[in-house]
Amino acid sequence: ACRATQVVHLFPTVSPEIVVREARLEDCWEVAETHCSSFFPEYSFPLDFVLRVDRLVGMLSGFSIPPGCRRTCLVAVIGGSVGDTFLFGTEDFKIGGFDGKFSLNKGYVTGILTIDTVADFLPRKGPLRQRRTGIAYISNVAVRERFRRKGIAKRLIAKAEAQAKSWGFRAVALHCDLNNPDAKKLYKDQGFRCITASEGANWPQPKTAPDVKFNFMMKLLNTPTTTA
């Protein structure tokens, strides 16, 4: 276990400040672990380990981003250096949305979020069903159970919005599980609004269990948020 993990478990009330930053290759396993423990908590060993490995491989094989599109994984970490003093690697090297740099003081991942411009799950436009442009898509928002209700998801979303603005995008969108009222309230408090498909429209949805239904939500980046 890394030193940051030991700090979190032994002294949870005096842990260092949580910092949101772009994920690096060294975070990959903890990102996979956070994702699987949040979305598949019922899995136990050895199936949970296999699931984590599968998720890890999926993240690192993310080379299939269409030309001109971007993907970034954000992490909320505790115990890492705010200044990122000891970094190795280049700015341009990325694997599946992960920064190719390494740090000697990585911190412990408490939450994750992915933002991309691929537009796979956005409604297509026109008779040729072209990809939407100008709207960044947020997915895989997850916070480890012991760190929930501490504002971490809000900070991840705020960072994602800032990233989308830096890309020159005018809006962000996501899908919210209809059976997760806490998530829906979180997104609504952050300024997201439900967008209803017109009758007969067949909008794409995330690939998950067939009985899971979603709300499609979107936020214009010049729309102010409300206070919870």
Image: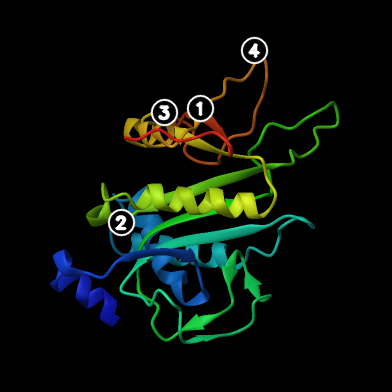
Mark 1 or 4: the one toward you: 1
Position of 67 compared to 157: left or right?
right
Q: CA distance from mark 4 to mark 2?
A: 38 Å
- Please give the residue where the numbered disc 1 appears in the rendered image: 193
What residue does disc 2 label? Answer: 144
Give the quadrant of residue 222.
top right
Question: Please, what is the three-letter code of the amino acid marked with disc 3?
Answer: Leu
Mark 3, residue position? 178
Q: Is residue 159 above or below residue 17?
A: above
Q: Is residue 203 above or below residue 2?
A: above
Q: Which residue is mark 4?
A: 199
The residue drawn where x is 38% and y is 82% is 105
Mark 4 secondary-structure assignment = loop
Residue 151 vertical placement versus 171 (above, below): below
Q: Earlier in the sequence, mark 1 or mark 4?
A: 1
* For the residues bearing labels 4 and 2, Cβ distance under 8 angstroms: no
Of the residues shown, which amino acid type is indicated by label 4? Glu
Which residue shows up at 51% across the image and 73% down it?
Answer: 24
Task: List x then y, in percent, for residue 120.
Answer: 67, 43
**What's under tag 1, amino acid-wise?**
Arg
